[in-house]
Amino acid sequence: MQAASNPDTIRNIVITGHTGAGKTMIAESLALSMGIINRLGSIEDGSTLSDYADDEKTRGHSLNTSIVHGTWKDHKINLIDTPGLLDFHGDVKSAMRVADTVMIAVNTTTGPEVGTDMVWEYTQEYYKPTMFVMTRLDADRTNFNQAVSELQAKFGHLVTPIQFPAEEGLGHHVVIDVLLMKKLEFSPDKPGSMEMDDIPDLYLKRAEELHNRLVEAVAETDEELMNLYFEKGSLTENELRAGIKSALLSRTFFPVFCTSPLHLIGSERLLDALVNLCPSPIERGPEHALCGNDECEALIEPDPEGPTVAFIFKTLSEPRLGELSYFRIYSGHIESGHELIDAQTGQAEKIGQVYTMEGEKKIPVPKLLAGDIGMVVKLRDAHTNDTLADKGTECRISPIVFPDPVFATAVTTVRQGDEEKISSGLHHLHEEDPSFRVEHDGESNQTVLKTLGETHLDTIITRLERKFGVQVTTVPAKIPYREAIRTSASAQGKYKKQSGGRGQYGDVWVRLEPGERDSGIVFASEVVGGVVPTRFLPAVEKGIRETATEGVLTGYPVVDLKAVVYDGSHHPVDSSEFAFKIAASMAFKAAFEKAKPMLLEPVSELTVKAPEQYTGEIVGEISSKRGKIIGMETQGSLQVIHAHMPQASLHDFHTNLIRLTQNRARYNYACSHYEEVPAEIAKEVTSEE
C-alpha cells in the first residue's frame, strides 16, 4: 500500500472552466505524464480516466467531480476534474471548496466564456490561488494573444503570461517559457519528450518583453522583491518562483500557461509548475471552522499530529457499493478503523477502508494525513457538507453554499405504487447533489424538482431510473393562483332539511368585504338579538373558512377579504352546528359570486445579471412575459436588471434567456406578492380548471 504523503508535498488542484475548454483532457494528459495511465483516453469513445460514468459517456461531457491522484518529482498531486456545464456548477463549487489552487482552462479558439466568468467569481468567493491554462493551441483558428487580452480585459492586468506558443495552429509543438527564458520543444503524443533549449532570435524580443513584465508584476506584489529588483534590475528564477507562489496566495498574480493536452504539449512543464509554484496545504494556511454551540470562528491548522477534522465535499451512490464519501482532511489523519463523530449530529462514524482515487479506480491506503483528499464507503449517516472529527472536537468546517436552483418542474410516476421509490430515490440523489431541491406542494399534491437547468433535470431523471429503477414523467408545476373580490356583497344561505324525525335548519346572512392584500380571511360577527345563537358562530366561521380554502371560481383558495355574519334565524329543535356550517358555506359562495370576483397570480421579484450587450433583449423578453422593469444598475462589467414577473412566465423565461444571451446571463427570483390576472388569461385558467 502507498505511504501517506506529508502536507508539504501535496498539491490539491481543481480543474475548472467553460464546457469544451479541455478540462478532462488536461487531467488525462497530466495522468499520462505522471505514469498513471499508459495511453491517452478519448472523450468521443468514453475512455478517459475521469469521465467514467455511463451518463458522462453518453453525453460526452463531465457531469460529476472526479479525482485523479499521481506523483510528480516526489510530490503527490490530487487533480479534481469538474463539469463545465453551468447546470452542474454545484460540483464545481464543492470541488473548489477543498482545493488549494484553481486551474481555469480556456479554449484559445473561443477565448473566455460564461463558464470562465462563473468560476472566476467562485475563486473570488473562496479567495483561491488561480492560474489560467490555455488549450487547443494546436487547433485551427486559435488566437493566443486575443484570448489573453480578453482575460486581462475581464479580470485585470494581474493576468500575466508565463508562456506563449512559438507558432499556433496545426503542428504547434513549441512553447516559449518566459520564467525559465527557454524554448520548450515537445514531440507530439510522446510523454517525457520535452526538450529545453535557448530561445531563437525570432522570439527573443517578445520573450524579453514578457519576461520583464513578469518580473515587474511579481516584484509589485512584495516590497522585499521590489527592493531587490531596484537594486539588481532583475530577479533570479528562484526569486521569481518564490514571488509567484506568494502572489498566488494573495491573489495579486494570475499566471497563464500553454498546453495542447490532446498531444501532450506542455503537460510536463505544467506539472513542474504545479509542484514549484502552487501552494501546499501548509502554505495555503489554516482553514476557517465554526466551533462550539455559539459557532464562533476558529482556524484549523493543517497539522497531521492535531485532532482529526475532515470535511465531506461530495457524496456518490453506487448500487453495488452504497454511498461513497469524498473528503478533505484539514487536521490530523484518517485511517481504517478510525472512530470519529459527525460534528453536525454527534453520530458516531467508524471508518472502513480508506481509498485514494484514479477516476473510477479505488486505491486502498492505510492512512491519509492532513491536507490530503480521499474516499470512504458506507458511512452510517454522514453526507455532503458534514464534518468528521475526533470525539471532543467541537469544530465543523463551514458548509459549501450551492447555487440556487431556479428551474421548477413537477414529476409524476409512470407506474402506480412507485411513489415511495421516487421519494427514496430523490432523497439519495439529493445527498449526491445538494444543488437541486425536492419540494412537495401540498396544495397541488405535486412533487416539484428545482434544478439549475433542463440538462440538470434530465440527468436527475436518468439517474433515478438507472440507479433506482423508477420512471417518471415531467409536467408543468402548477401555479398557486388565488381568488379574491373587488367589491362588497351580501347573500343569504339557508339550509333546511326535513326527512322524518329531527330535521336540519340553519340560516345566515353573510357580507363579504375586500381586505388588504395578504390579510387572509378575517371573520367577524354583527349578530344581535340572538337570531344566530352564539354557540353556532364557530360552525359558521368553520363553514366560511373551509369554503374559502376550497375556492369558488376555480378551486384555488380565497384570500384577502372580511366575512361578516350579521343576520339569520334558527330553529329551537332542528338547528345544529352542521346545518349552520352548510348555511354559511352557501351564503359565502352566493355573496362571493356577486362581489365581482377575480383571480390573483403570484408575482416574483426577478434579478437578472448579464453583459451589457444583452440588456435590450432581456428587457424585451421580460416585457413580453408580462414583466415590469423596476430598476437597473451596473455591477462591474454586468448590467443588473430588477423586475417583477408573474410566476407563470418563469418557465419559458429560463429557456429563452439562455437562447437570447448564449447562456451568459444568470438570474434568481423570490415570491414577492399577488396581482390580479388579466381578464383574457384568467379566462384561460378558469376554463382549464
Image (cartoon, helix red, strand yellow):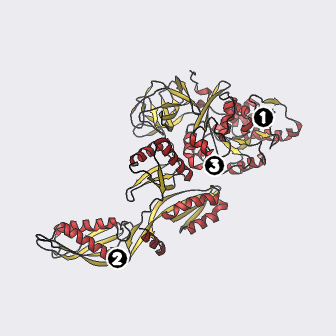
Q: Earlier in the sequence, mark 1 or mark 3?
A: 3
> Mark 1: which amino acid?
Pro
**Image location of residue 58, percent across then percent down:** 60, 44
The answer to which quarter of the image holds residue 103 is top right
Q: Earlier in the sequence, mark 3 or mark 2?
A: 3
- What is the C-alpha distance between the residues marked 3 and 2? 53 Å
Is there CB contact under 8 Å for labels 1 and 2?
Answer: no
Q: Earlier in the sequence, mark 1 or mark 2?
A: 1
**Image location of residue 343, percent across then percent down:** 42, 35
Say which mark, if any, is on residue 593: 2
Q: Does residue 184 appear left or right of residue 341 in this picture?
A: right
The answer to which quarter of the image holds residue 123 is top right
Q: Does residue 476 appear left or right of residue 517 in this picture?
A: right
The residue that mark 1 highlights is 188
- Residue sitting nearer the eye, 618 or 684: 684
> Which residue does the image show at 49% across and 64% down from the upper left?
648
> Mark 2: which amino acid?
Glu
- What is the C-alpha distance between the residues marked 1 and 2? 80 Å
Local crowd size for mark 3, using a 10 Å CA cut-off: few (<14), some (14–19), many (≥20): many
The residue that mark 3 highlights is 115
Looking at the image, residue 571 lies above or below residue 345: below
The answer to which quarter of the image holds residue 491 is bottom left
